[in-house]
Image (spheres, rainbow, N blue to C red):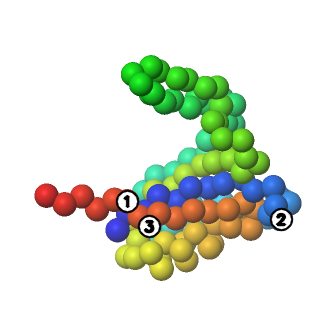
Amino acid sequence: MQFLMLVWNDPAAETYVPAEDTIEAWVTTNDAAGRRREGDRLQAPEDGRTVRVRSGKLLVTEGPFVETQEQIAGFDLLECVDLDEAVAVAADHPMARFGTLEVRPFWKWTD
């Protein structure tokens, strides 16, 4: 099963300590095991745009539309046996301490 793991900055989490950031080891381990297909950090929200179409009119807003302290900081595409394995993989990610991780399965399309 494929899962999208969203990595969120979270001001309520532990203070980020660069020396304790084990992301390179996490990536290496999960790439080697075939559990991580792709992933990357994202630029700051103010560098992006929110795009909506309402009543046929294009509405583009600079940065995120919602006002929140949490921000999506990155993502990983995971290939895991089930949700329990995806949660275990997320729990080992350093941002589980310094931020928040959201793990969601992809929609199952039927013919």
* Pointer 1 residue: 106
Query: Residue 14: which numbered mark, if any?
Result: 2
Q: Is residue 28 visible?
A: no
* Pointer 3 residue: 35
Q: Earlier in the sequence, mark 1 or mark 3?
A: 3
Q: In the shown orientation, is residue 106 left or right of residue 87? A: left
Q: Position of residue 46 (x, y in %)?
A: 69, 31
Circles 1 and 3, Cβ within 8 Å, touching? The answer is: no
- Residue type at the position of mark 2: Glu
Residue at the top extreme, as displayed: 57
- Above or below, 96 against 64 in this view is below
- Residue type at the position of mark 1: Phe
Query: Residue 63: which numbered mark, if any?
Result: none
Q: Residue at x 86, y 60 (%)?
A: 15
Q: In the shown orientation, is residue 79 left or right of residue 30? A: left
Q: CA distance from mark 1 to mark 2?
A: 29 Å
Q: Quadrant of the C terminus?
A: bottom left
